Each structure stands twice: as C-alpha cells, then as structure tokens.
Amino acid sequence: MAKQKQDEGLAPKLTINDIARMAGVSKKTVSRVINRSPLLNQETRDKVEEIIRETGYVPNPQARALALGRNFLIGLIYDNPNVQMILSMQKGILEALHGTEFEMVIRPVDRGSNLVMDDIRSFVTRQRLFGVVILPPMSENDALARMLDEEGCRYVRMGSAVLDDAEHMVTSNDREAVAEAVRYLIAQGHRRIGLIAGPHGFRSAQERREGFELALAEAGISLPRSLVADGQYTFESGLSASESLLDLSPRPTAIFASNDEMAAGVLYAARLRGIAVPEELSIIGFDDTPVTTRVWPPLTTVRWPIVAMGRAAALKLIGTAIGEGAEVNEPSHFSSTLIRRGSVAPPAAS
Amino acid sequence: MAKQKQDEGLAPKLTINDIARMAGVSKKTVSRVINRSPLLNQETRDKVEEIIRETGYVPNPQARALALGRNFLIGLIYDNPNVQMILSMQKGILEALHGTEFEMVIRPVDRGSNLVMDDIRSFVTRQRLFGVVILPPMSENDALARMLDEEGCRYVRMGSAVLDDAEHMVTSNDREAVAEAVRYLIAQGHRRIGLIAGPHGFRSAQERREGFELALAEAGISLPRSLVADGQYTFESGLSASESLLDLSPRPTAIFASNDEMAAGVLYAARLRGIAVPEELSIIGFDDTPVTTRVWPPLTTVRWPIVAMGRAAALKLIGTAIGEGAEVNEPSHFSSTLIRRGSVAPPAAS
DNA sequence: CATAATTCGGACACCGGTGTCATTTGAATC
DNA sequence: GATTCAAATGACACCGGTGTCCGAATTATG
C-alpha cells in the first residue's frame, strides 16, 4: 500500500481566487471574463484579462466540468474495421480541437454485440461528454441517435448520404464519386465491369453500388447478376469475392471494388492466376488508403477528404461553444475525387 | 445565441447523498465503500454495496477528479508516423481500460517542434492526467521523463530497449529479433545482405541495426559500408534508399529493411527494375503490418506484440489504482517472432 | 436636486465527491 | 463497575469553478 505523496514543490496551481484577489474583484467577475459574459464593464474586463495573461492562469477543467455538469470531452465512436479511416478521422478531429479546452476520447464498439447501446450510453453519461462523433456504419443507427438525444448529448454522424437527420450529418457523396469512376472505365472502353459490393446493411455499400449501377445504366450497359459479388470491406473478402468474377467466361475486363482493401484483394487474386493488371484487368478501389501506392501497379481509387470531414464534424460540435455559431444546422457536404494511378487501361482487344 | 436547455426529463442522476440516505449512513461512509477503505465494518459495507448494486449508482468522475486533484484519464503521446502501430497501441490500451473508470486521451505531437515540451506539459497538467503512455521515438526523450516526474505525472515508456529508466519501461527486444531474421537469411545461403536502416536518433533504428550487424559478425561476414542505406521508416524513403543498394554490382541477394513500409519500398523498387522477388532478391521487413500481406509476394517480417504491449503499459499505469499492485517496478519485456511469408528464398546460383 | 432605471459587481449556495478530525460505540483491562 | 483504548462512523470544510439573486454605483428622467 504505497502512500500518496504528491505535489512536492510543484508550482502551486493558480485558482480563480488568486486571480480575483490580484485583480481586486470577486471570483464571479473573473468567471464572467472567462466565459465572455456580455454584462461586464470593458475596463474591468481588460484589467482581469491582463492579469490572466501575465500569470498564465488556466481554469481547472475538472471544476468547470463539475459545476457545469458537462465535460469538455468529445467522444469518437466507431465499429469500423478500417484503421486508416479511423486514424484520419482522429487526425481531423484533433486538428479542430487543438488549442481549445477540448480533448478527444475514443470508444470502439463491437459491431453485433447487443450491449453496444448500453455501453455507449454509460460512456456518454458517465463522462458527461460534450458531444460525440459517430463513424459509419454505426452512424446509420437511428436508435443510437435517438438515445443520444434523450441523454442530451450532442452528436455528429459521418455518412455517405444525408439521412433523415440532416442537422447532424457530415457527408460525402459516394454515389456520385463511384459513378464517375465507373464512367471513366466505360470511357476507356470497358463493357464487362464487375462489382465487389460492400457488406449488406452498410449505407456506404449501398450508395457505392447505386453509383455503379447508375453509370452503367447511363451507358446502356446491362448488369448481369453474375458480375456482382459480395464483400465485407476486408482484404480477404475481396480476395475470395473476386474468385467468382475471375472464373467467369468471358471474364470481366474491369472490376470496381467498393473499398481499397478489397481492391487489393482483387489485385492479389489476379496475381495468383497470372492475370496481368492493368493489361488484362483494370481495377478501381475506394478510399485512397496508403495500400494503393504500396502494391504494384498502384491502384486507381476514389479519395474522400476524411481529415477535412473529421475537422468539420468536430467544429460542428464545438462551434457553438467557442462562439463560431455559424451554419450549424446545415449538413456539411464534401465531395470526392478520382485518383488515377496505374491499375486502369483500355481492355485488351478481344 | 441559443439558450441552453438541458436535463429535460432525464432520469435524475443519483448522487452519493442519495445512496447515503437510502443506506442510512453518511456520505463519507459511502465514499469509503467506493474506495475500498479497510476500516469499515463488513456489515455496513455489504449493506451499502447492496444498495449501490440495486440502484446502479456510479460516482461522478468529474467530482472525484476535482476532489482528488487528478483525472481518470490516460494520455497517449506520440510523434510517430506509423499509423498501424499507433492504432494497435490504442487498441491495447483501450482493452486494458475497458470496464474501468479510465478513459484514454490522445496527443500527437510534432516531432521537431520546440514547443513540444510545453505542449505536453500543459496537456498533462491542465487535464491532471492520471498517467501517460509514450510511444517511441518520443519515449527515448529523457528530458520529457524528467518533466513528467516533476509534474507528478505517472508515465510508461514504450521502447525497443531498456533505457536508464527500467521502472517505467515496456519493451521489446528488437536487436535479438533482427539478429534472428538475419540468421535466417544466412541459413538460406545469403552472404551479400543489404540493410536499410531507420532514421538517426531512433533507438529502435539503432537496435535493429545492431541486431543486423550482430548476426553478420557471428557468421564471420563482413559488412561493407556500401551495403547500408539510410531510411526514414517511410515507404518513399525505403524506395529511394534501395536504389543505391540495387545499383551495386554485385547486387545484394537479400535486403533487411528496418520496417515494413520501407520493405514495401524495396519490393516496389525491385518491381520497377524487373528484379524478381524472391528469386533474385530476398526481403525481410519489421512490424508485421497489414501491408505485408497485401503486396506480392507477401513479405517475411518480424512481428512484435504491440497490442499486448499497449495493454501491459496501461495496466502498469493503473495497476496500483485498481488494486493489482503486482510487479510494477519491473520492466515488462516482450519478445518478437519471425513471420515467414513469401519474400525469402535461397539466392540464385551465381 | 431627488428619484427611478439601468448596469455592474459581489455574497453565497451549490455541483458531487474526498480529507481531517472529532465523536460514538463496543470490547478489553484493571 | 469504572477506565482505557481501538474501531467504526459522522460532521464539516474543501476542491475550483458557476448560477442566482441582491445591493451598490451610475446614469437617465421628472
């Protein structure tokens, strides 16, 4: 049982009382300065601010949290297997939070577990989170959004389409981005184009699929069921899903995979069978993760601005708090771009 | 200026006073039960615990943080470019923290910025962090450790070797792991083996280099300077560093890259030059990141148990707090294993 | 110039826990 | 049975902020 021996000779922390005494005002007045209360004499405000600056005083977040009944923490909730996306999102959120009093806490949850809801509820209520950012596919869960509303916890949902809840959405337009990618394949001369779809129940998977079908329909190309394979957004699933496509005769001359991991799986499968990419098979992925440039040939893909979206999400949450209360009721919409690398070529003359 | 309208009809949060009233004891007694104070009558303890269980009462972390002058947050500090490692580490830490009252907060810092120290100081003092985990190479910064000591902030340093500060270290033995990998190459018949080293100033880079040299020395193989190239632990640096090695005549028959990203760069460079891997060039990397299985051929590499190390680090920090006060003064040491995939073969007969 | 209206600042309670120290209780000792 | 002592519990201040409400100072008005 080690005794606690703390605070040996540390610079004693300044409190609001110290500042009040030094400024010759009451602590409440200092509090008003900190919180930018409008009903303050400019002189008083200047005086107190001066002292705060000189002393480098910073209010104790724990005390504020207790008094306000709300912590200065932004939660990040995800049940997503895509590490790259998660880290980019963290990066964006941290960028927005940097220099503010907010910190980010993270809660990965088990997709499928039926304790998820309780887990998240206790997460947000115990820590009295200021707000949370929810990543897809969890963000598509309306029950979760309702629960957060009930608990009085702000939230922003990242998504690939505007759901019923525009006010809380930060989105990218996956459907149109995929359509553009597929139009590019068609422009190169491809007609037999395979799709590796994402998992059922993922909104993004559906959006991407719709974009795929849209581009084909525009060009009057029919899509036999055999050219669509189901994947799980993982490398392994992309690898096995592509088997059925590559067994087809005639073989598709191009494959769109609904994310990069699966696209890497397609590439791997092609290699195993000795199919040359891009000469005999063109591949396009989605996400623009680093893997696209590590493999050979580097993969053509769709890039969506994850970091920027993370930043936007965090700003949307804390915007009111730090006094940038602009257009907070609009969904924030981002668009994606096709990144052309080496995995697409015109189909071999057949 | 939106008004704040909170707590509409939420289940009012239970406080320690409620529990005290229900149990017919003082709040201090309830506090003692919560904190497992030893000087409590067993009967009283049981009665209070019973009520706590029934009501599902959870103490307010903000209030505890204020009263104790210490928050229940574990910080993760890194200046490391390796996303995969960071996420694995997060995973390990979160695993250890799950079910406790602790949360994890993250602080990426700019390597090189001279504000780093102040940034971290304000991070740990403002939030009154319970403790922090520091990832390499930042973990090798002794000045940082001293500063944390001064501030009374617990810390654990992840590293590839035990520094002067064994008590706070969680380590893996990179040197021995690399030596084993290189012995494997030698056993396959390789004699001209190139090294792509990590950046100067990284302890892990030095350890890996030493392991490399050790294995060569054991086998009586000399290491000409030309067989060593400097990298930065990035894909691009691996790509360019391997240029000089592959230009050599005679060319090395194998290359050890100090991490997987650079190994992927070597593979890419080989592909650009039409050098067959593994027939004409064997490659071994380090870290066992997913990229090793995405490329062709899949890369032989060294796996170190990052998740387990993250878990160990977090447990080491909170161990005393949750009453598992075991061997906390020992460094926790982990060992790595060679993962054999497809990028190593005996050298072509020359 | 007296009075009312308005603005500004302060006293005090409170958020929900913990530390200190005094008090009560029961058993042990003489 | 009175005294002593240790163990168990409680009263109260305190951590460092914020909300409420009221009084003082300042200005506008009659």
Image: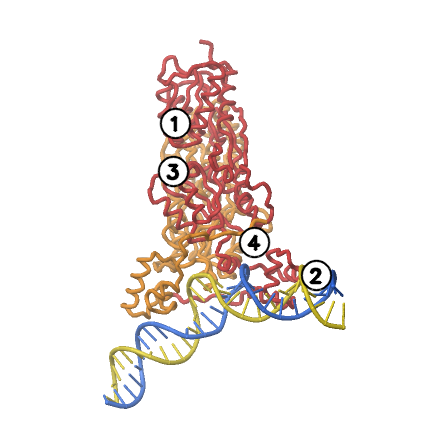
Chain colours: A orange, B red, C blue, D yellow
Q: Is residue A196 left or right of residue A19?
A: right
Tell me the number on the disc at residue A117. 4
Q: Spatial distance from mark 1 to mark 2, Cα to Cα? A: 66 Å
Query: Is tag 3's residue or tag 4's residue first in the polypeptide sequence?
Result: 4
How packed mark 1 is, by other alpha carbons closer than 10 Å (few <14, some 14-19, many 20 or more), is: many
Q: Are marks 1 and 2 on the same chain?
A: yes
Q: Residue B333: x, y in percent? A: 54, 34
SS at mark 3 in the image: helix
Q: Spatial distance from mark 4 to mark 2, Cα to Cα? A: 35 Å
Query: The disc numbered 2 marks a residue on which chain?
Result: B
Tell me the number on the disc at residue B43. 2
Residue nearest the observer in this picture, A167 or B73: B73
Q: Spatial distance from mark 3 to mark 2, Cα to Cα? A: 75 Å
Q: Are marks 4 and 2 on the same chain?
A: no
Q: Residue A30: x, y in percent? A: 36, 65
Whether pointer 4 and pointer 2 mark residues with C-beta atoms closer than 8 Å, the reply is no
Query: Is tag 1's residue or tag 2's residue first in the polypeptide sequence?
Result: 2
- Which residue, given by chain and number where applicable, does mark 1 sit on? B238
